[in-house]
Amino acid sequence: MDQILNYIDGKHFEPVAGKYLENINPAEGKTYGMLPDSDAEDVKLAVKAASAAFASWSAMPLSKRSAILLAIADLIDRDLDKLALAESMDQGKPLKLAKAVDIPRASANMRFYATASMHTSSESHFMEGEAINYTTRTAIGVAGCISPWNLPLYLFTWKIAPALAAGCTVVAKPSELTPMTAYLFSKLCIEAGLPAGVLNIVHGLGGKVGQAIVEHPEVRAISFTGGTVTGKTIAATAAPMFKKLSLELGGKNPNLIFADCDFEQAVSTSINSSFSNQGEICLCGSRILVERSLYQKFVDEFVKRTKELTVGDPLDEKTRVGALVSEGHMNKVLSYIDLAKKEGGKILCGGKRVVLSGRCATGYFVEPTVVVGLDQSCRTNQEEIFGPVVTIMPFDTEEEAISYANSNAYGLSATLWTENLKRAHRVAHQIKSGIIWVNCWLLRDLRTPFGGMKQSGIGREGGWEALRFFTEAKNVCIKL
Ligand code: TXE
């Protein structure tokens, strides 16, 4: 098994202090490798390399920069099987999911921004008889990209690709829980001919490496995806230094099922939006709200299909629900199930840790869990659980559904199920979330703005939004 190393100035290095952390395979609950326990010294070296590389990378012709990023995308596709296996072992997700979603999306991210940057244009504003203005957008400098453990390479590339395409150089930190694919990615960058220092990857803990990236005065922008509590710390650190910030934080997303929906599609997609990736997706619809006339029918069918989901070895083709990312996270999810019971919830299925036999006997598995009987304001319905746990509640009117959907501090995404077009527009307009899906879920066009309202963060990723984030506008006014 590969020893994970930092990637700084185009080469792999041991951490300066020589310390390492254990990398655990969550399906087995066992250590299977080590990763650098880096600190501020490693970050300093990475920022130095990124700063030195900035002038030439940002001045490189777009077509040349684009070609390098496209070469990385091709190498990701070539190594699909290897990367998917690494992702599954590191994260606990079904191998099948990593092969179908995570890794293809990582190469799509690279390709999307490699080509998007070729289509940018500058604006010009003509002042009749007086002056002409033109606005340029130039790369902001060294960007810090900090990503989480739920969709490791997918979200790592979602940040790095626009930053590099915009002409920034990058110091990146993947989650310490899932470092492997970022390490393999660094090898692909070398193979693709990415110039030294353009991308630097420092592995280690958030409080040490992440914090040092955010604090470093030469890092001009921070793109972060992770928990809301961490987002607050980052915002507090970065604000006095006037850094640009993009924070994609948690969600507690409502999934609204109206009685006039296409029942089969609503149920089958809701199973995915509840339990895909073990519920460890910030977009999962963990609060299901069903119009009362359909409530019992929906609950019966949803519970029946939840019970049919196979929890098992992530490498097994039949597995739909793999392992949770860590023991700590599994215990957090189980504690929320206890809380739901204490708050008066009734567990209709699931609710317990799953103990498998063989290789996965000490893995971190939890049954897909459905809870009913809770009110909107209880903690179970207010806080992000980020696991295979959903609540189902009835509503009587459209107004009530909207008010329940909005009765939460988060505002990332929402899903609506209705065949009534007018209703779909009306409700979508009134829900305070950055992303609304009508009769679908997780259907993504990479050109669209992606991000949340309220406690779900600030800023938007995706499309031009991300390229704007990593650049600064400059207006030049010329008197005629
Ligand atoms: O994430 P953290 P955690 C939610 C989910 C989860 C909760 C906590 O509810 O249960 O957050 O998860 C780095 N400065 N989401 O604590 O810590 C860290 O090393 C800079 C939702 O595991 O936010 C990692 O690389 N960086 C989410 C990254 O932040 C710091 C995905 C995310 O980890 C840092 C993950 C610091 N002070 C969790 N402290 C989503 N939006 O998809 C930590 N990090």
Image: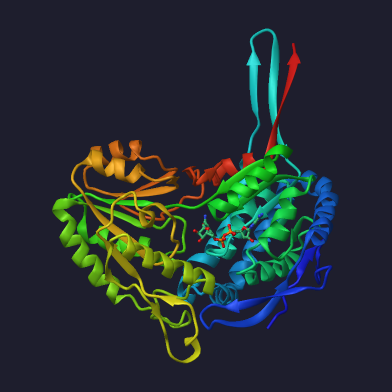
What is the x, y in percent for residue 312? 41, 81
- Position above or below: 315 against 137: below
Residue 379 location, quadrant: bottom left
Determine the residue positioned at 64% across, 16% down: 126
Could you tell me which residue is drawn at 80 percent across and 45 percent down? 218
In the image, taking residue 436 as reference, residue 308 lies left or right, namely left
Furthest toward the left, the residue is 293
Q: Nearer the viewer, residue 378 or 477?
A: 378
**Quarter occupied by residue 6:** bottom right
Percent across and percent down for residue 57 are 79, 49
Query: For the image shown, how many numbered marks are present on the structure?
Result: 0
Residue at 69% x, 17% y is 132
Residue 326 seen in render: no
In the picture as drawn, the residue positioned furthest to the top comes out as 129
Image point (28%, 61%), residue name: 344
**Rendered-image quarter of ligand 1:** bottom right
Residue 387 shows in the view:
yes
Q: Position of residue 460 (x, y in %)?
A: 54, 43
Tell me: 232 left or right of 205.
Answer: left
Name above or below for residue 474 compared with residue 300.
above
Residue 116, x across and y down, in percent: 60, 46
Rendering colour mode: rainbow
Q: Nearer the viewer, residue 185 or 4?
A: 4
Quarter assignment of residue 198: bottom right
Quadrant in the picture for the C terminus: top right
Left or right of 359 on screen, residue 207: right
Instruction: Between residue 194 and residue 329, name the one nearer to us.
Output: 329
Q: Residue furthest bottom?
A: 358
Q: Quarter of the image containing the N terminus?
A: bottom right
